[in-house]
Image (cartoon, rainbow, N blue to C red):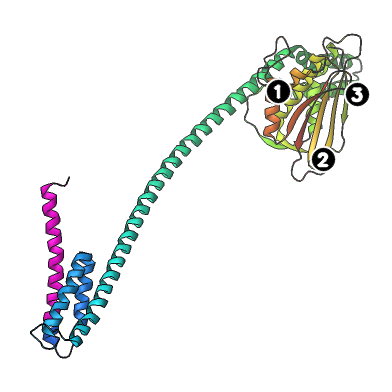
Amino acid sequence: METPAGVQNRIRSIALKFGIAALSVAVALLITQALQPTVFPTPLFFAAIVISTWFGGTGPGVFAVLFATVLLDYYFVSPTRGFSMHPAGLLYLAQFSLPALLSSWFVKKRREAEAALKEARDQLDVKVQQRTAELRRTNEQLQLEISERKRAEEAFHKTQAELAHLTRVMTMSELATSIAHEVNQPLAAIVTNGDACVRWLGLEPPNLDRARDSVARMINEGKRASEVIKRIRALSKKTTPHKSALQINELIHEMIALLGTELLKNKIRLTTQLGPDVPLVFGDRVQLQQVILNLVVNGIEAMSEVQGRSRELLIRTEKASSDRVQVSVQDCGCGLDAEQSEHLFEAFFTTKPGGIGMGLSISRTIIEAHGGRLWASPNSDYGAKFQFALPMAEGSES
């Protein structure tokens, strides 16, 4: 229910609108009378009606039409200073009042259309502002989520790198005997050649040619020992990935050199079918060495319990397609069953009693980070085959 103060304000507003209408018509009358006979009487009254309808609405507009008609009849229709009742005067007034009412209606409709348009524009502005605010909040939330995701990815990669390093170190620890043998062989050869050199020099006269040969062999064995130590340090060192064009056959030869004693100890015959024209691949040397090391060690361990048949390990490299190099490591161990195949590359899944289940998971992550693919399949008779494919380095020719 409207309050008394509200009623009073409404009455004042209506009175003001009708007052504006009356004032507009009165001003039109005064100006028309002052400019007579040079000005036709009706245009200024039309203007007064338009002003009254625009600012006051329908009621003041109709009032202005009626008031203007009365003033026209009294002041401008013959006889002046009186109200005309003859047909000609009434027709003149009708020709004024009807267009005036129509003009008032048009002005009212235009006013309503502009008001509706303004309201729609205001509502649109409000919606745009609300939508902009929502988009801003969504964008801020998205930026926060992106930042959180980046931090999570950085933490994941850091943890993954640490696990990869741990796996390498654990693998190197398991192969400590083989590594010691690989280092001990050139050292023993150096000692033997040193003794021979001393004997050749102790002869009368000294056999310098034989002594020189002994020293040359000592140098070669020293370089061999140095290369073995370099490979061990590279594998055990915690470094950031550094990708470059690599010859995959060279990496395989380096890993075989480290695992020679392990192969002999487990009575495994290693066969290599390394394609002579295999293109270069683009990757990190240490990471790809780790993948090869993991696959070969897994193959050796898979055949550790094999009895009654030969233990054979096959490593093959080939150009698989126009832009891929493929590496296969095939053993003749116990093979893979369906349940193992489903979980083989999952983290912490292992079939070895002392395993931690990270080697294959890390290997697949490394290969996928290089744009490649790692998979496993059972052989038709015994054992399993692990294969990975890597993209060729740009500009590499087969």
Q: Is residue 396 left or right of residue 212?
A: left
Quarter occupied by residue 397: top right
Tell me which amino acid carries mark 2: Ser
Q: Residues within 10 Å of mark 3 (few under 14, many from 20)?
A: few
Where's the C terminus, which quadrant? top right
Residue 20 lies, in percent from the top left, at 14, 68
Residue 273 lies, in percent from the top left, at 88, 29
User: CA separation, marks 1 and 3?
Assistant: 58 Å
Which comes before the other along the chain, label 1 or label 2? 2
- Main SS class of the magenta portion in the image: helix
Residue occupying the point 61% across, 22% down: 162
Helix or strand or loop: what does disc 2 sit on? strand
Q: Is residue 91 magenta?
A: no
User: CA separation, marks 3 and 2?
Assistant: 53 Å
Tell me which amino acid carries mark 1: Phe
Magenta-drawn segment? 1-30
Q: Check whether the beta carbons of the residues at disc 1 and disc 3 lie within 8 A of each other.
A: no
Residue occupying the point 89% across, 16% down: 200
Position of 343 relative to 6 (above/below): above
Q: Which residue is mark 3?
A: 209
Label annotation for residue 321: 2
Front: mark 1 or 3: 1
Where's the N terminus, which quadrant? top left
Position of 13 relative to 256 (above/below): below
Tell me which amino acid carries mark 3: Asp
Q: Which residue is mark 1?
A: 345
